[in-house]
Image (spheres, grey):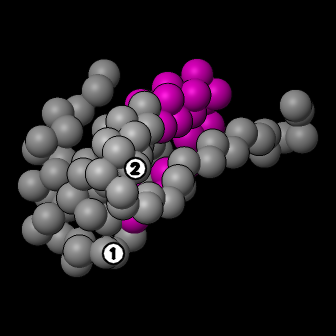
């Protein structure tokens, strides 16, 4: 179940300085990662379930692509930072 991103944004604003990093060890579908990005924070998320990891990367990547295209259209440079890493702790691939 996805959490309401606007509520997570409020929690992040209250607890993480702007430009700071949010760590979410169980990121699920990426709601916290989106909230961190929207509030000007960096984010690192971990997820053991590949389907959730793919969903989170897609959600954050889609939003970043939208903002990147908008910024580039207005002559602003934007760094791309979504890099999903999928691996297994037990050595299976």
Q: Give the residue pinned by disc 1.
A: 20
Kindly indicate the quadrant of the structure image that contains residue 51.
top right
Q: What whole-number distance in Å separates the C-alpha atoms at marks 1 and 2? A: 24 Å
Residue at 49 percent of width and 29 percent of height: 58
Is residue 42 positioned above or below 88 on the image? below
Which contiguous range is marked in magenta?
42-61
Residue at 22%, 77% in the rendered image = 17
Q: Which residue is mark 2?
A: 72
**In percent of the image, x 23 and y 32: which residue is there?**
3
Q: Position of residue 46 (x, y in %)?
A: 55, 48
Can you tell which quarter of the image residue 28 is in? top left
**Quadrant placement of the N terminus:** top left
Magenta includes 53?
A: yes
Please indicate, yes or no, whether residue 87 appears anywhere in the rendered image. yes
Q: Give the quadrant of the C terminus.
A: top right
In this rendering, position of residue 50 left or right of residue 29: right
């Amino acid at each position: 179940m996805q959490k309401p991103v606007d509520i997570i944004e409020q929690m992040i604003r209250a607890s993480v300085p702007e430009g700071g990093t949010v760590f979410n060890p169980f990121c699920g579908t990426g709601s916290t990662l989106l909230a961190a990005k929207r509030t000007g924070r960096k984010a690192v998320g971990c997820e053991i379930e590949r389907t959730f990891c793919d969903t989170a990367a897609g959600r954050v990547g889609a939003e970043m692509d939208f903002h990147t295209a908008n910024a580039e259209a207005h002559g602003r440079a934007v760094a791309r930072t979504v890099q999903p890493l999928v691996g297994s702790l037990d050595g299976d691939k």
